Image: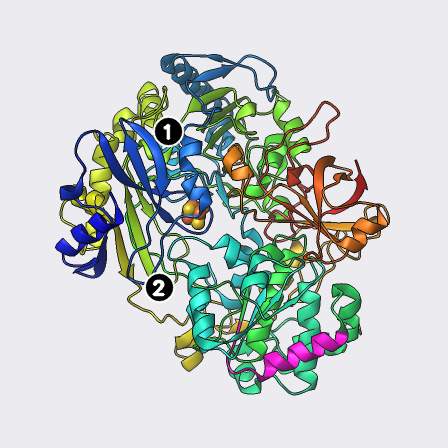
Amino acid sequence: MDRRKFLKWSAALGGMTALTGGGLLHCVGSRTAQPPLRERDVWTSCNVNCGGRCALRAHVVDGVVRAIDSEADTAGHAATACLRGRAMRHRLYAPDRLKYPMLRVGARGEGKFRRASWDEALDLLAARLREAIDTWGNESVYLNVGTGNWGAVLSNSCSSGAPTISRLMNCLGGHLRSYGTYSYAMLEAALPYTYGGAWVDGNPITDVAHSELAVFFGNNPATTRMGGLGVSHDLARALRRSGTRLIVIDPRHSDTAATFADEWIPIRPGTDAALVSALAHVLITENLVDHDFLATHTIGYDEDSMPDGVPAGQSYRSHILGLGPDRTAKTPGWAEAITGIPAERIVRLAREIGAAKPCYIAQGWSLQRQANGEQNCRAVCMLPILTGNVGIRGGNTGAREGFFTMPFAGFPTLDNPVAASIPCFMWTEAVRRGHEMTATTDGVRGVDKLPSDIRFIWNFAGNCLINQHSDANRTARILVDETKCRTIVVIDNVMTASARFADILLPGVTNLEEDDFALSDYATDIGYVIFARKAVEPLFESRSIYDICAAVAKRLGVGEAYTEGRDRAGWLAHLYEESRRLLPGLPERMDDAFDTGIFRMRDPEAPRVPYAAFRRDPVANPLDTPSGRIEIFSKRLWDLGKTWQLGPDERIPGLPEYVPAWEGVEDPLRRTYPLQLIGHHPRQRTHSTGDNVDWLRRIERQELWMNPADAALRGIAQGDMVRVFNARGAVLIPARVTPRIAPGVLSLPEGAWYAPAQDGADTGGCINVLTTQRPSPLAKGNPQHTNLVQVEKA
Ligand code: SF4
């Protein structure tokens, strides 16, 4: 289909967009437009976990995808694919594609398998599942995080377990739940103590156009929100329209700092809360705080607004001015020594923030993936709170930018009778010593103590079994111990690093081999669903996750309860009808929706301003906190910090104050491992998805970012092979010597596949060889940017 025909056909249908009920139906294809013979274009989607969601057009000739491209719509919003999406054909036809079911024959993790029939593999899977449930209970069955098929509705892999597998397990009596994510566990756990509720929203990025100044702490939408009708696109337009000044604070000169920002302020990792404390010191001492807002909408700012039962001297103002127990004023000079940012620049930044009315302050998720991540993300929220920028247009809460999610029916998982849940980052501990894990030691929820270790793992479309989980060498040691976890089932498209640890390895289809609905991810004020059509028949013996689960359900006597008499196509039709109740503008017939491609819907509440009602009248519209106000001091956290069992170098304070991180800038361990290592999102893959594709590897090399001063000290030149190491392992990788990373800091793009050599050193460039499984204090989340390392020329 060429563009001229596309435009002509679209025009014949009444223009590029046709208004249908509450939504806009954007025509990207047409039933009448199907080319004859066996050559056709099929609209499908890129379903990776990149923060966007793009439409892909597969050009299919004689049942083979010959090309993938994309197409911008003409309504001023791009949903066009990046090179990663356009490489989908390379993933579909990858040489390491899993072709048929396989059963492990060597030691676990060795990667030795034999071919099996589907019947043999599914019989064994069903028998092992029955064994786990009967012997150790339903709590022994765990659904590991998988984000490889993120956008799909029916074949969704999900951070808390794929809904298809979850439904199967719930038909069988339930499974051990997980909570939190590898992306934002600390933020999700901590910010509700400040603002209440389960999730703290932010103003949409488009609000930057109404701000005098925007300040991002570690936020990098140019890489992490680059696709679809998403944040990067909307930020570019907002800045272009308004000329708003943007400052990015980040240890790395990110793509956002490079392309959108007026200024980059490098900071040492894990010290954001110290910077905020010093900014607060200037705001308070120079009378730049919004006293009215603080008095009417917050508690804990000064000694007059503290909750009952807390000794004197614990207020935020006392803490910042050095009147609290530590008797240390959080001056810019104090912060310079910690953050590496000159005191003079801190003073100027505080004055800029204090003077900008309104000011849009947002944070990305990197600064909370730290050992002290809960404190960093709570601290950043103090800037809009102190300056009264919450609940107004052009302001923000200090959280990440808000987004709009269109309603659409999901695959029903049924109720899980198992009450217990663990932080998703703690699954290796639950394999090793689950029966010892409690609420106050390990963040177990739903029960005081776990009744069982994990004995059976489902790992669908995910690489957290080894690659994306911290301390890969330790994970490998835990997994190879067959006296612990009895069965590991992996369902994937290719032989990932995680797939090598399977006992039962099943070939799943890619999203080009099945129909599904793909929902927009982080879209600002236009949500959409891509009706993603099957482009080719499933390759080799691959099967959809639904069909696999239905077959296991049948073997275990719950087939009818699982399917409700529907096959996969029947469920799609059913979910479509359910969705039509939520979205009356959808075409009457599902086939018409698949033929037309994308259904878009503008946020009916745009422009959305979170907490606006609270801002207008905090008494009539209280927050969901114990006080009904913003809690600068959280009595709940204060109490929790006294009852939970924490390490000697861990604290959960009531205030959003700076707590030095273990393995942070102030740790004496720096005498052995002097450099701080962080990770960043690469351009050449999405997390670990696509690392097997040569075509993508050529977009950008896997390299260790290193400041010229640190390189010179070690005699390292551009492109030299280096060994980066700590007590947990070593990685061999070329050096990228660049001033785009702060001195004393290294960055290794996350997601490269774990490939240990004979001597144990990783040759794949996998950062998780160097990260720790020690969790953060409150969320028990993954501090994957808190690592001390040393580097030497290899
Ligand atoms: S990786 Fe993200 S931005 Fe790129 S095509 Fe896929 S969804 Fe779009």
Marks 1/2: CA–CA distance: 32 Å
On the image, numbered disc 1 is attached to which residue?
Answer: 509
Residue 339 position within the rendered picture, expressed as x and y whole percent measured from the top left? 74, 64
Q: Badge 2, how many Cα within 10 Å: few under 14, some, many 20+?
A: many
Q: Residue at the location (53% across, 32% down)?
A: 692
The image shows residue 276, relative to residue 498, as above or below, that is: below
Q: Which portion, as a residue range, is magenta? A: 343-360
Residue 349 magenta-drawn? yes
Residue 281 position within the rendered picture, expressed as x and y whole percent measured from the top left? 70, 78
Residue 636 position within the rendered picture, expressed as x and y whole percent measured from the top left? 58, 63
Task: Say which element carries label 1.
Answer: loop
Q: Main secondary structure of the magenta part?
A: helix
Amino acid carrying label 1: it is Val
Q: Residue at the location (50% across, 36% down)?
A: 695
Q: Residue at the location (48% across, 77% down)?
A: 211
Task: Say which element carries label 2.
Answer: loop
On the image, numbered disc 2 is attached to which residue?
Answer: 525
Residue 193 magenta-drawn? no
Task: Report whether 234 appears left or right of 742.
Answer: left
Query: Where, by quadrant of the figure, is residue 2 drawn?
Result: top left
Task: Report whether 153 appears left or right of 778.
Answer: left
Quadrant where the C terminus sits is top right
Quadrant where the N terminus sits is top left
Residue 307 position within the rendered picture, expressed as x and y whole percent measured from the top left? 60, 73
